[in-house]
Image: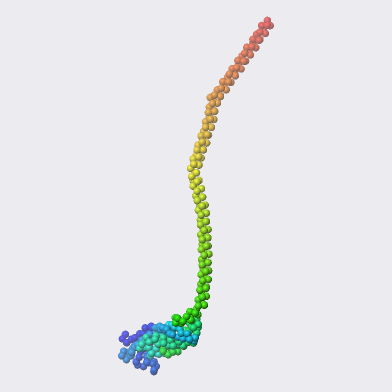
Amino acid sequence: MFGYRVPAPDEAMLISGGRNRGADTPFRVVTGHGTFVMPVFRKVRFLTLAMCEAEVQEACVTRQAIALNVKAVIAFKVGNDYESIVNAGRRFLSDQGQMSMLVGQIFAGHLRSIVGSMTVEEIVTERQKLATEVLDGSKEEMAKIGLTIDSLQIQSIDDKGLGYIEAMAAPHNATIRQRAQIAQAASAQASAEAEQESQRKQAEFSRQTQVVQAQYKAEVDSAQAKAAQAGPLAQAQAQREVIDMQTELAQRGAALRQQQLVAEVVRPAEAEAERVRILALADAEKMRIQAEAAASHNRVALDR
């Protein structure tokens, strides 16, 4: 629709001209929705509400008069409330890129002031304390220009090659190196022990494997020997059974032959001998009878 304007989600729409919210407020602020703007009579400009970033790299002097280079990064944005948007619009609407430069200058001043009240040891070991104090010191000034700070990160602290920070870290580094050497020695010992244990287990496994292989080979050799002997043993058994059968057949043949000999020789011989005996007995009986008859005849003759 002609004349209807809508700001982006991270923008504030500032409408100038005509009657506004406050007597001393040059803008009408619109965020989160659109509105109709009368052409020609009203002028519309947009102020970013997105997150911005400023870097500070400042040479500072500590309470001990030691020069340090401190580098920090500030994340900031225009506040979401009406007053902050108006304050930021009055200062930066025509050149919003100046916000980062001005924020960097503000924080550089507060950083020098806070570092000057601290020792190197405090700055190095308590960076969060340094960041918090810088934030607290700059809040009021940032609020006046409509900006809020989301975070301040101290990225690096350098003593310009004087070696003070390095000297501070020397005892700690020595302790760390000593602990590292001890840990390395313990690790090497543990590694050696693990290697020895691994070798022992490998040797034990190899021994067990060889024993199992030997047992398996013995069983295989025994099975192969039995298999090799099975043929000759079966053949010998068969031959023995054949011999036993032949022996039995021979014995049966001999018995049969004996029976045949008894039937063919012994029995006839016995029968002949019996016949001869009977004939001899008959001849003897005949001669006895004849002798008795002769004797009786002789007696009769003598009696006459």
What colouring does the structure picture have? rainbow
Left or right of 120 on screen, residue 92: left
User: In this picture, is 278 found above or below 152?
Assistant: above
Q: Is residue 298 visible?
A: yes
Give the x, y percent position of residue 142. 43, 88
Give the x, y percent position of residue 57. 42, 84
Quadrant (top left/top right/bottom left/bottom right) for the N terminus: bottom left
User: In this picture, is 253 found above or below 1?
Assistant: above
Q: How many marks?
A: 0
Of residues 28 and 183, the one drawn nearer to the viewer in this rendering: 183
Give the residue drawn at x 50%, y 82%: 121
Give the x, y percent position of residue 195. 51, 63
Q: Is residue 114 visible?
A: no
Which residue, as the protein is rendered here, is positioned at the far front? 162
Give the residue drawn at x 68%, y 6%: 302
Of residues 43 and 279, the one drawn nearer to the viewer in this rendering: 43
Of residues 116 and 98, the one drawn nearer to the viewer in this rendering: 116
Q: Quadrant of residue 259?
A: top right
Give the x, y percent position of residue 16. 35, 91
